[in-house]
Amino acid sequence: MKALSINASTGTVEELEITMEANTVYTFFNSILIDELATINKHQINTDANALANKKPAYFVGEQLLVGDALIVGKEEFTDLDASISVEELSSLVKTDIPEFYTKTLDLLSQTDINLYRTFTLEKGEESMTLNTEWVLYAFNMADENTQGYFLEHLKKVVDAKESAEEYMHKMASLAINASQGQN
């Protein structure tokens, strides 16, 4: 089966020939904790869920923040397929220039057990939104410098006090949603 891998340290994309078995992805990362993302149409991006804690390099595939190496396979519903995106197409989507806000935030979050992609539900009146920590980082990366400073200062306090980083992200998601709705 044709698969693609992204080397987090270099940002390079490589084509691989793999035999997809029950443990292929786990063997690739030498880990049983895998994040599965559907960022690329008809593909699944697999990353090591321990990459953040292990302070692996971060990068973007399009707008999707990834941490650590990635393995990409084709996916249609529940069926694994050959990756149909080319090395060149995927390479054009990989951006290794990470804004300082992300770098500082990921460094702090690496000291916690948070997962960037685990979803949570935010209730706002009658509305219900499913978000994750990666979305919170995206939202605050667009904020002004003072807001980013506030976010980082309070995140550091949460980390130093060994409080719940997930609860902090829920609170920050709520603030981001309120701020965006206040601007409309």
Image: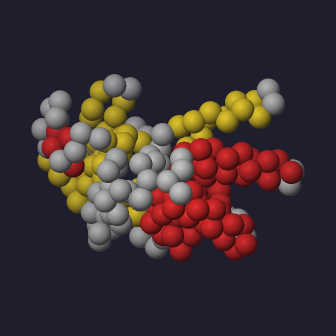
Quick one: 133 or 65, which is closer to the camera?
133
Quarter holding residue 8: bottom left
Q: If the image is split into quadrants, where does the N terminus sit?
A: top left
Q: How far from the left and from the top, in percent, is residue 135?
A: 58, 50
Q: Is residue 2 left or right of residue 89?
A: left
Residue in the picture at 17% in, 39% down: 24
Quick one: 117 or 172, which is closer to the camera?
172
Q: Is residue 30 above or below residue 151?
A: above
Q: How far from the left and from the top, in percent, is residue 4?
A: 26, 52
The answer, for residue 156, to whether it is visible in the render is: yes
Residue in the picture at 53% in, 37% down: 119
Q: Is residue 148 left or right of residue 75?
A: right
Residue in the picture at 73% in, 72% down: 146
The answer, for residue 65, to whether it is visible in the render is: no
Residue in the picture at 27% in, 63% down: 7
Q: Is residue 56 above or below residue 37?
A: below
